Amino acid sequence: MTGLTNDRAGSGATPEQERHLPSDGDAAAGLDAAAAAAAPRECPEEDRPRVEIGSEELTGQWADKFNVTRAQLEEAVSAVGSDEHAVATYLRGQGGGD
């Protein structure tokens, strides 16, 4: 592997791509690009799926997905908010859901 460096100036990558290139610190920590890409990442809260119950149609779709009644779904969202994972966890604890 001669001629390969982690010199960002000569990488030919766009600034957007450079933000995703491994740094010398990654190599020092024993992380290569494949391992860094495969590592689980915390999903920012704003990117998490949300259970929308603003209409009868949406409420019905989510209730069907979780295999619960609309009332159970609305109770879950009221209790834990609209984060899909939190709603699913709440419903499982209540004896509903998948």
Image (tube, grey):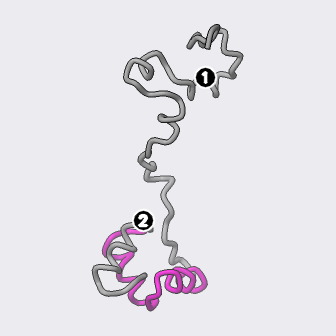
Report the amino acid beneath label 2: Asp
SS of the residue at dot 2?
loop
Find the residue positioned furthest to the left: 93
Which quadrant, please, contains the C terminus?
bottom left
SS of the residue at dot 1?
helix
Q: Label 1: which residue?
A: 18
Q: Is residue 89 left or right of residue 17?
A: left
Q: Is residue 64 above or below residue 82?
A: below
Q: Residue at x 46, y 89 (%)?
A: 70
Magenta highlight range: 56-83
Q: Quadrant of residue 60?
A: bottom right
Q: Label 2: which residue?
A: 83
Q: Nearer the viewer, residue 27 or 71?
A: 27
Q: Is residue 85 magenta?
A: no
Report the amino acid beneath label 1: Glu
Mark 1 neighbour density, 10 Å: few (under 14) some (14–19) many (20 or more): some
Q: Is residue 62 above or below residue 4?
A: below
Q: Residue at x 36, y 79 (%)?
A: 76
Q: Residue at x 64, y 8 (%)?
A: 3
* Residue 58 position in % (x across, y down): 57, 80
Mark 2 neighbour density, 10 Å: few (under 14) some (14–19) many (20 or more): some
Q: Quadrant of residue 55?
A: bottom right
